[in-house]
Amino acid sequence: MRKFISVFVMYLMVIAAVSCSLTVGAQHLSVEHRVDSVLSLMTLDEKIGQMNQYSGFWEATGPITEEGDKLEQVRNGMLGSMLNVTGSGHTRQIQEMALQSRLRIPLLFGQDIIHGYRTIFPIPLAEAASWDLQAIEQSARIAATEASAAGVHWTFAPMVDISRDPRWGRVMEGAGEDPYLGSLIAAARVRGFQGKGLGNTDALMACGKHFAAYGAAIGGRDYNSVDMSLQQLNDVYLKPYKAAVDAGVATMMNSFNDINGIPATANQYILRDLLKGSWGFTGFVVSDWGSVGEMINHGYVTNEADAARAALTGGCDMDMESRCYIKNMKQLVLSGIISESLIDESVKLILRKKFEMGLFDDPFRFCSEEREKQQWDNPQNRAAARNIARKSIVLLKNENKLLPLSREVRTIAMIGPLVKAVGDNNGFWSYAWPDDSARIVTQWQGISNRAGKNVKMLYARGCGITEPDTSGFREAVVAAMNADVVIMSVGESANMSGEAKSRSNIHLPGVQEELVKAVCATGKPVVLLINAGRPLVFNNISGNSGAILYTWWLGTEAGNAIADVVFGDYNPSGKLPMTFPRTEGQIPVYYSYLNTGRPPKNENDLNYVSAYTDLPNSPEYPFGYGLSYSTFSISEPVPDKTVFSPGEEVHVRVIVTNTGETEGTETVQLYFRDKVGSLVRPVKQLAGFQQVLLKKAESRTLTFTLTDKDFSFFNDKLEFRSEPGEFELFAGNCSAIEKGVSIWLK
Ligand code: GLC
């Protein structure tokens, strides 16, 4: 009895000390001290509870395995986090339940705030086409402000997976094919989401995902295996994740795929050796939905207990939705298979973030109905969404200056299945609000509003998105015949790209190509708006229309942004963040390819060279491509030295001039080629870009600064090194630049 009393007294003393430190003198106690204090009070069950995450009761974002009473587990401290719970009311309600647990440890509420919450911004791939890092950061900042006002603590973003395969539906969620651009965008999005730092009530914990190389799924088939050399993995695919870590990302999410035979969920090389080891990441890793348990399907483990063992040993700290941790981890510890110190490591990482978010000091600090109302329909947020949306539009073609529309136009026919689409404009990973039909500016509304009352607007749907029915063609052709100009809006539906939306055929679905041909056959000038979450193949119709705008999915302000460009209120400046293939058979096609021993001399050379006999090697549109209503000349790069040493800066000057008739923005891109290496090197690599707004006839001298670090790569020993030799520099308005200038590294 005496022993029990002394233990109980000690327990009370520790509780008093911790609660005192947590409430009164918390400021002077370090987070580490507070974490250790709470950990010292926790039972093994409570520790494992922190490593357990369930989805809430609203939109599920993965296969639901409904088991047990989630809320009972919340009350008993058997959950560390929930996802898919939003709203200050809902989160308060569930947080109150969590505070009924013995140690009153608050929950983390996570959510896929990918490109906006209440105000929806362009899909991330569209934003990447803006090449405007400030606008991209602001987009994430606004998303964080809106979502944190709705009780969300943690976003499962940015998705930074490099991908060179548009069959993969999740290209819509990332920043395209290039590690240099992708790394800058990853860092911008982390800064945007985390703002002035965790602990501010408008800051979200960001989450770099999906770690790693999820975008290299074989065949572009979602969740498929990834198989590549460690050199390629480090030199291309890992760079944006590293950029997110260097930008201070709070958490990382492992991907579903296996990498060279080891599932990312349990892959010690990427999770422990790199991420938590040489990269110095101090946050925690959450699994992707059910990926712990899915290692049974992979054939990597025999059962859920083995899955829990492998995942934790591999470096995964929190188990989203598989329940392998909560159901097996205790037994693994009691049977000595898993050391409790490994559990403690993960729990401390999770508790640390809860302290940093201020949730121990005030678990309801994000549940402010007042703040939620303030952020609910903020006009500044819509203005920012419109701004980046118009910057994301890429002008692919503009014959005879069809765009911007002439002021003489008196009748416009808008034709196509997406002209009056509402929710589709938001793209995948967005929220459908009950009042969307009143809030989202459709393409019809945007164009009609901007055209004004002196312009007659005609409309014909023409056909569906996927349906084979052509009975609407006649009405469409009649509308076209009665118009001065036709604006067609075609493409995929929003849910044809995104998670689990890989497609083997990425042509325009249904009979849309036939509709475009029928309307173009009228001889009327046609502007084509192509809406998609990925590069589509449309070479069968690209010759028919006079102008093509790639409008992706642009969000709440889609119609206004498109109207801004169509009527010339904004001179388009978007540049493709992904190569557009001529056809699916060309995939993977990307600008940073290796030359091979038999490169074709030209597009007609088929004499024992690396080429298809039925298709040129060049893409439909290259990485970095995008036209303007103006034209620009870009000089060859002029380095201030042609021979340089390691560590020495080379300053490269490029003169860009607006040679057109109207003010416009050009994105001047600098590429290089390492002519000879211990490993063969790509024919081009992006090493810099600068966006300049120039008036008519205005010139600007840009300076790019390079060192040998920019030319470094992971060699076959995985050492990140530069090598002496010749480097060719290219400057231009896209990646398809032939002529370069050489410099030599000693
Ligand atoms: C999904 C996605 C991941 C998302 C998570 C939670 O399966 O792969 O990107 O963050 O589950 O919704």
Image (cartoon, rainbow, N blue to C red):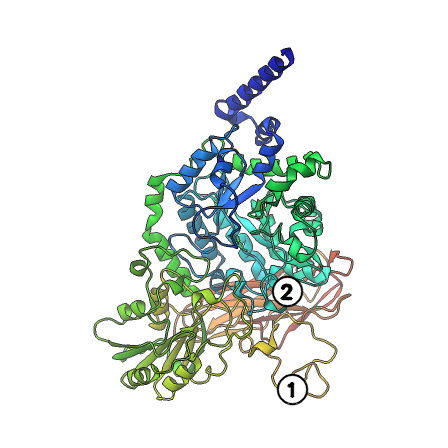
How far is disc 2 from disc 1 in space, using C-alphas?
Answer: 43 Å
Residue 263 position within the rendered picture, expressed as x and y whole percent measured from the top left? 67, 55
Q: In the rendered view, tell whether residue 456 sits above or below residue 125.
A: below
Q: Residues within 10 Å of mark 1 (few under 14, many from 20)?
A: few
The amino acid type found where label 1 is placed reads Thr
Residue 502 position within the rendered picture, expressed as x and y whole percent measured from the top left? 54, 67
Q: Is residue 213 rendered to the left or right of residue 458?
A: right
Which residue is painted at 75% across and 78% down in the image?
Answer: 597
Which residue is painted at 65% across and 13% down in the image?
Answer: 3
- As drawn, the residue found furthest toward the top would be 2
Secondary structure found at label 1 = loop
Secondary structure found at label 2 = loop
Residue 630's quadrant in the figure?
Answer: bottom left
- The residue pinned by badge 1 equals 613
Q: In the rendered view, tell whether residue 571 sits above or below residue 326.
A: below
Residue 458 position within the rendered picture, expressed as x and y whole percent measured from the top left? 27, 77
Which residue is painted at 65% across and 86% down in the image?
Answer: 613
Q: Quadrant of the C terminus?
A: bottom right
Q: In the rendered view, tell whether residue 294 sits above or below residue 20.
A: below
* Label pair 2/1, CB-CB below 8 angstroms: no
The amino acid type found where label 2 is placed reads Asp
